[in-house]
Image: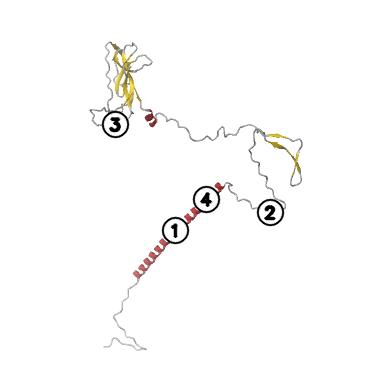
Amino acid sequence: MMVDIYMDGRFVHAEAHLREPDGECIGVYDTPTQTRPFVFTALSTTESDDHAATADYSDGALGTICVTMTRMRRYNRSKVFVPRPFSEIGPINEKSKKAGSHAVSLGDPEQSGGVSIDGIDPIGEEKKPFAKFIFSYMPMALLQAKDIVPLPERPSKKRPLNTQEDAPEAGPSRRKTRRTSGPVKEERDNGEEENTLVTEASPSIPDTTPPPPPPHKLSKKCPLDNQEEAPVPGPSNPKARRLMNRSAKKEDSEVKEDALVLEQFMAKLQGELATIQRRLEEAQAAAQRARAVKREASPINVPTTSGDQIVDLTSD
């Protein structure tokens, strides 16, 4: 097969492979024994739109290394070496700068270690490659911006929950318990005696644990009515109690606000209902007037008579 290599869209090298497991390309050969290695150089950009003075890389070839593989039957080595031209990338338009800030160029000439390279004449080469690999190279910041390379981990500012200094030391208690030469007797309220043990802290390790509060006992002499009132249930921390009171006040204000909104809505509904009632009464009155019969005064004047007098209207 024939392996062709392109740098930034420029053809730089061709290599014939039969049964070789691998190969490499480190530069461009100027002579059969001299090569110029590939190096990265910074791109020069311009804002000019003059295509004659600037290179056009709108096809996306800038910042890529392309390797194609094409089948062929065999090849012949040519004794005539023909150097391949390599064009440097000149100033490019700022709009075409999409792959980064540098490109592939050639370094200073170096000797190839006495290894001579010959030309290759492929025979029976297919028209299209059967494999094509495209590698994109760009600065680290751009690789991280495109999520190709992960970002470096930032040091966490949070303090771990359990540290070695704060964690209590595991193991048995260092407090030592000893029994005195004789039992210590304590008298209870009910007159009974009890043997107790006396505990002492180790002198090398001071005990900073506060003593437990004494148990609350009711005096037999004082009646229950004279005792102090029981504490109001709730948090003992003043800050927590203030927060609880604040939340209760907030709930009361929200309830009052909801009641005010409902009252305003009810007043609005009552006003609309009164307007509808007035319009209904006006419509009913208009309908009643339309049904009434209009009466006119009669043109015949009938005189009033007194008693049983009869008037004959037929006499002349």
The residue under label 1 is 264
The residue under label 3 is 94
Mark 2: secondary structure: helix
Mark 1: secondary structure: helix
Residue situated in front as seen by the camera: 225 or 4 = 225
In this rendering, position of residue 174 left or right of residue 272: right
Q: Position of residue 115 (x, y in %)?
A: 33, 11
Kind of residue at badge 1: Gln
- Marks 3 & 4, CB-CB < 8 Å contact: no
The residue under label 2 is 224
Of the numbered discs 2 and 4, the one sitting upstream in the chain is 2
Kind of residue at badge 4: Arg
Q: Where, by quadrant of the figure, is residue 292 drawn? A: bottom left
From the image, which quarter does the C terminus lie in?
bottom left
In this rendering, position of residue 53 left or right of residue 179: left
* Label 2 environment density (alpha carbons within 10 Å; few <14, some 14–19, many ≥20): few
Q: Where, by quadrant of the figure, is residue 81 drawn? A: top left
* Residue 246, numbered circle: 4
Kind of residue at badge 3: Glu
Can I make out residue 72 in this image?
no
Distance of mark 2 from mark 4, alpha carbons? 34 Å
Question: At 46% across and 57% down in the image, what residue appears?
Answer: 260
Up-down relation of residue 269 to residue 291 (above or below):
above
Distance of mark 1 from mark 2, alpha carbons? 52 Å
Distance of mark 3 from mark 4, alpha carbons? 61 Å
